[in-house]
Amino acid sequence: MEKNGVSDADYIRSKLDDNKEVRVRKIDNGETMTAYGYDSEETSIGSISNRDAIKCKWKGENGVEWDDVFNIYAFERAESN
């Protein structure tokens, strides 16, 4: 998706490049997470660049915080701006 001429992936990367966390929403199920960095070691998620694999954290239903790596193209920005 694109907002104001900036794709969601580019928006997420711009925040991560500035060492900022960014709220993201999984496109397939609407689950929101916080992206906080890249994982340059990850190759199993189909990354073609080390800026495609992003580290995200979220709280599960039981309140436990989880941390995992996803492909940036599985997300859209959850923030309105």
Image (cartoon, rainbow, N blue to C red):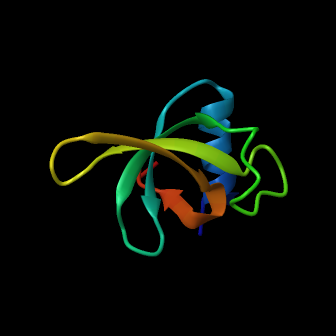
Q: Nearer the viewer, residue 44 or 5?
A: 44
Q: Give coordinates of residue 52: x percent, y percent.
A: 72, 51
| Quarter assignment of residue 38 | top right
Where 46 sits versus 77, above or below?
A: below
Q: Quick one: which residue is furthest to the top in this view?
A: 19
Q: Quick one: which residue is furthest to the bottom in this view?
A: 28
Q: Nearer the viewer, residue 10 or 45?
A: 45
- Left or right of 66: which side holds 48? right
Q: Nearer the viewer, residue 67 or 78?
A: 67
- Left or right of 49: which side holds 54? left
Count the numbered circles shown: 0
- Position of the N terminus, as image quadrant, is bottom right
Where 73 sits versus 42, above or below?
A: below
Q: Give coordinates of residue 3: x percent, y percent.
A: 57, 61
Q: Looking at the image, which residue is at 36% across and 68% down?
A: 30
- Left or right of 15: which side holds 40? right
Q: Looking at the image, which residue is at 34% across and 45% down?
A: 58
Q: Quick one: which residue is furthest to the right in this view?
A: 48
Q: Looking at the image, which residue is at 49% across and 32% down?
A: 21
- Left or right of 38: which side holds 62? left
Q: Quick one: which residue is furthest to the front in this view?
A: 44
Q: Give coordinates of residue 27: x percent, y percent.
A: 48, 70
Q: Looking at the image, which residue is at 60% across and 58% down?
A: 8
Q: Give coordinates of residue 13: x percent, y percent.
A: 67, 42
